[in-house]
Each structure stands twice: as structure tokens, then as C-alpha cells.
């Protein structure tokens, strides 16, 4: 996962800082934490862990003003600063003042506010920097590319030919059996999260019949580019790794013919 | 000249062949037909907005809430170690549909995606220039934000259910 660089884009290794080095993974590596045993850490309440993270979080120090930064916006709930290691000029980091590590920990009210401001910042970026696009990006967890212990939303200005390729997501095919498994597990968990019961859920049908919602095509099987030869007999796997490895890489489709430039121009 | 109907609007209304995971009439979530990773979910407002900046405040708030809840579910449902939330806003950013959408990507170590980009350090001068430009526009933002700020009551911290918190952390640390 590491590239050649020590310091991730989300870290602030200012030359004029207080000697704070990289504060990448959560949990902190400050002096305090090293005095605690693993046992003690495990027994700490979420609140105590949070307090500890806050002490070691460079972004909390930036928010409190102890460490220098280039603020472009702040209010009671959030703060936005320029990333000193930007993907493109104008790369903004937007974060809640309160210390949260990942999005699931954030109350609705706060995360809604964060995204509302992200929208305004995206707008400001489009106008101020005369660009025609932005990527809004969140990474929850190291596996997703999270490097800072403090939750943040990236607002990254984009223009034609800027050679940023990472947000051109690959387009893969998926085996229908794998897809079905994924669908069912997600559906079940999502229903639970929203308190949707089987009866209330008019969009799905009995597990025996159709698992997918196809009101217009209930008599036609869904079109599928995959061959059906082996897929029906494949053992459904609960291992996401196996499913990932079955992906067949496909060449990227051409960009859709959408004239959004005009619309973006309307804004500016 | 008839324009092709918006694919997302069609899905939101219950048409198309998408595998819909959630639809409350205001927001729809479905599996991507050409996923970047297994379990790639697309979330969109039922109402048609082309780009991010056009989405109404209320609608965006609701989309955000639903996205957060769905992406939290992803950890447990798919044993994911992480999630990405991505909006590709505008053609240069790789926007795929003519209708605003967000993507939720369930992540695992070595799943083939990599968002760790190389750094491009900017000079102090360049940074300051950008800072000034953005600040000009942020004053209007501030005024706007003031109007729409939530009521100034005591903000309660979300009650963290220790079990849930540990569970999510557990999934994130798997294989690490």
C-alpha cells in the first residue's frame, strides 16, 4: 500500500510546524499512546479512545490553531484547508471540527452539514479556479486509502488533460452468482439499517422468486454479457477476495457524450 | 428530436434492470452494472439534477444520510475493510451519467484499486495564491451558510454503541 513517499497527502509536514511528523494511521503514535498497553487500549471506552486520538491528531491541532494551515473556510461545524500536497492546485480538505475517524461514527446532522459545505466549496473551486469539474472523495479505513486519523472530505479540482487517472474507475464484469450473493447480503443488511421489514419492502420479492426488482421485465431474464455455462454451478463464496479475483478486466468505455460544460459554465 | 430518457430517473421510478438496494422515493441506491469493485453501489436522488452544485440542500442532506447508512452496512454485509465515497462531478472529473450520482466502493486490501496518489508539493507562493482566490469566494459561502446553519442548540455527540464501533473497527483491521 505504501508508495515511495513517507508522508501522505493528508498529512501536514510543515517545515515551520512543531516537529509533528506523519500522523497517518489512527490511534496516534505520540508519546502518550506508547505508555498504554494493548490491554488498556482495549478496555477504553470509545470516548476515551477518541480523547486520546484527539491529542495525537495533527488536524485537531490545526483546527485549534496550534499548527499553521491555509484555511479557506470555517464555521461552527467544519473547517476547510488547502492540502499542502495537492493532487491538483486548489485541493481542499474539508473536515468536521469534532474528531471522528470515519464516516459511520458521524451523526447525521454533522455529516449532512459537511456535504452541504462540500457542495459550496466545490462551487467556489469551480469559479475561483476556472475549472470544469471536481472530484469529491472520502476514504474510510486504511484499505480505502485513508491516511489521516481525522475524517475528511477531499474536494479536488479537475480539468481536461490534468493527467489524474485514479478517479477513472475501472469497469468490470461480475459473475451473476457472485452478484446475487452480494446483492442479497447487502439488501438484508440495508433493510435492517433502515428498519425495513419484509412486508414493507415492496421493491423486493420472495427469495424463491425474484431477488431483483424487474417490474418491466419480469418475464424476461436480465440481459447479461457473461456466459452462463459455469456460473450456475459455481459455489457461492462468502469470501470477497475470491469474488474480486474472478473479475475480468475490461477495457474502459469511452466517456459518455454529455455536454456538462455548458451547464458548468452557467455557474460561472 | 426526442432525447433518450435519463437512465437514473428511470431506475428511480422503478424501471430499468438495475438491482435496486434501496428506494424511498427521494433517493435510490443500486448495484453498478459495471462495478469498479464487487459491491459497487450507486446512490442518486430521484429528482433529476445534473451536477453536484445543482442538487437542492434538502435532497443532498437526505442523500448524504442514506449514503452514510448504506456505506456503514457495507462493512458488515460484505466484510469490507474500508469504503470510499466518490462523486465525479463534471466531465473532466469523469462523471458517468447526466444525472448526479455518488459511488460507494467496498474496499479490501489488494483489491486492485489504489487511491494513494503521488504528491505534488506546491510552493508557498502558489499555495497562497490559491488560498486568496478561494477565500474571495468563501465569504459568499459564509453568508449563505449562516442562513442555513442548523439551530444553535447543544449538539449531542452521537451515542456510540461500543459494539458497533468495535465491529466496524474489526472489519477495518482484518488482514491488516
Image: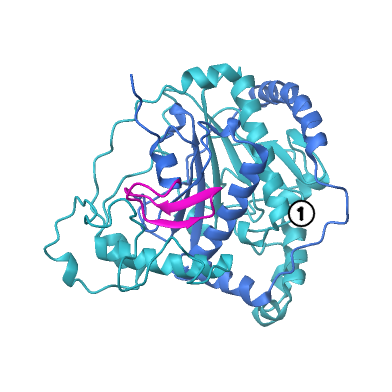
Chain colours: A cyan, B blue
Q: Front-most of B121 and A116?
A: A116
* Image: B55 above or below A233: above
**Which residue occupies the extreme right position in the image?**
B153
Q: Front-most of B47 and B92?
A: B47
The part of the image, by quadrant, that contains residue B95 is: top left
Q: Residue at x 42, y 21 (%)?
A: A259
Residue A245 left/right relative to B99 = left
Residue B102 left/right relative to A183 = right
The part of the image, by quadrant, that contains residue B139 is: top right
Q: Is residue A13 visible?
A: no
**Which residue occupies the extreme left position in the image?**
A229
Q: Position of residue A40 (x, y in %)?
A: 71, 80
Q: Front-most of A174 and B2?
A: B2
Q: Which residues are magenta?
A: B13-34
The part of the image, by quadrant, that contains residue B6 is: top left
10 Å neighbourhood of mark 1: few (<14), some, or many (≥20)? Answer: some
Is B115 included in the stretch rendered in magenta?
no
Q: Residue at x 36, y 49 (%)?
A: B36
Q: Position of residue B79 (x, y in %)?
A: 45, 69
Q: Position of residue B118 (x, y in %)?
A: 48, 39
Q: Position of residue A46 (x, y in %)?
A: 72, 71
Quadrant where the C terminus of chain A sits is top right
Callout 1: chain: A
* Image: A195 above or below B139: below
Q: Which residue is mark 1?
A: A98
Is B17 included in the stretch rendered in magenta?
yes
Q: Residue at x 44, y 27 (%)?
A: B92
Amino acid at each position: 500500500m505504501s508508495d515511495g513517499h513517507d508522508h501522505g497527502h493528508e498529512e501536514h509536514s510543515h517545515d515551520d510546524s512543531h516537529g509533528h511528523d506523519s500522523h497517518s494511521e489512527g490511534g496516534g503514535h505520540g508519546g502518550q499512546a506508547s505508555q498504554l498497553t494493548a490491554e488498556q487500549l482495549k478496555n477504553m471506552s470509545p470516548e476515551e479512545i477518541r480523547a486520546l486520538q484527539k491529542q495525537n491528531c495533527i488536524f485537531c491541532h490545526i483546527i485549534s490553531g496550534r499548527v499553521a494551515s491555509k484555511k479557506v473556510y470555517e464555521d461552527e461545524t467544519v473547517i476547510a484547508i488547502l492540502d499542502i500536497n495537492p493532487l491538483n492546485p486548489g485541493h481542499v480538505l474539508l473536515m468536521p471540527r469534532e474528531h471522528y475517524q470515519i464516516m459511520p461514527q458521524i451523526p447525521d446532522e454533522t455529516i449532512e452539514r459537511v456535504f452541504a459545505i462540500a457542495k459550496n466549496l466545490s462551487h467556489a473551486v469551480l469559479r475561483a479556479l476556472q475549472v470544469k469539474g471536481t472530484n469529491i472523495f472520502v476514504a474510510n479505513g486504511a484499505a480505502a486509502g485513508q491516511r489521516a486519523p481525522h475524517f475528511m472530505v477531499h474536494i479536488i479540482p479537475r480539468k481536461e488533460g490534468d493527467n489524474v487517472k485514479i478517479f477513472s474507475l475501472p469497469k468490470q464484469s461480475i459473475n451473476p452468482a457472485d452478484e446475487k450473493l452480494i446483492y442479497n447480503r447487502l439488501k438484508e443488511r440495508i433493510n435492517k439499517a433502515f428498519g425495513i421489514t419484509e412486508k414493507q419492502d415492496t421493491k423486493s420479492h420472495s427469495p424463491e422468486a425474484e431477488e431483483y426488482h424487474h417490474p418491466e421485465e419480469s418475464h424476461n431474464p436480465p440481459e447479461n454479457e457473461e456466459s452462463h455455462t459455469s456460473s450456475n454451478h459455481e459455489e457461492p463464496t462468502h469470501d470477497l477476495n475470491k469474488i474480486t479475483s474472478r473479475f475480468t478486466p475490461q477495457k474502459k468505455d469511452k466517456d459518455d457524450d454529455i455536454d456538462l460544460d455548458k451547464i458548468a459554465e452557467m455557474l460561472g | 428530436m426526442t432525447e433518450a430518457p435519463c437512465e437514473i430517473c428511470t431506475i428511480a421510478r422503478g424501471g430499468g434492470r438495475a438491482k435496486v438496494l434501496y428506494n424511498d422515493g427521494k433517493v435510490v441506491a443500486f448495484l453498478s452494472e459495471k462495478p469498479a469493485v464487487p459491491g459497487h453501489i450507486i446512490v442518486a436522488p430521484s429528482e433529476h439534477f445534473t451536477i453536484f452544485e445543482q442538487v437542492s440542500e434538502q435532497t443532498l442532506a437526505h442523500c448524504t444520510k442514506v449514503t452514510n447508512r448504506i456505506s456503514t452496512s457495507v462493512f458488515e454485509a460484505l466484510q469490507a475493510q474500508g469504503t470510499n465515497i466518490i462523486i465525479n462531478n463534471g466531465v473532466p472529473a469523469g462523471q458517468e451519467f447526466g444525472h448526479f450520482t455518488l459511488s460507494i466502493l467496498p474496499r479490501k486490501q489488494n483489491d486492485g484499486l489504489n487511491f494513494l496518489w503521488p504528491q505534488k508539493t506546491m510552493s508557498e507562493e502558489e499555495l497562497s495564491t490559491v488560498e486568496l482566490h478561494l477565500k474571495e469566494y468563501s465569504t459568499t459561502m459564509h453568508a449563505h451558510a449562516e442562513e442555513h446553519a442548523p439551530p444553535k442548540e447543544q449538539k449531542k455527540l452521537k451515542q456510540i454503541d461500543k459494539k458497533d464501533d468495535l465491529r466496524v473497527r474489526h472489519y477495518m483491521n482484518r488482514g491488516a
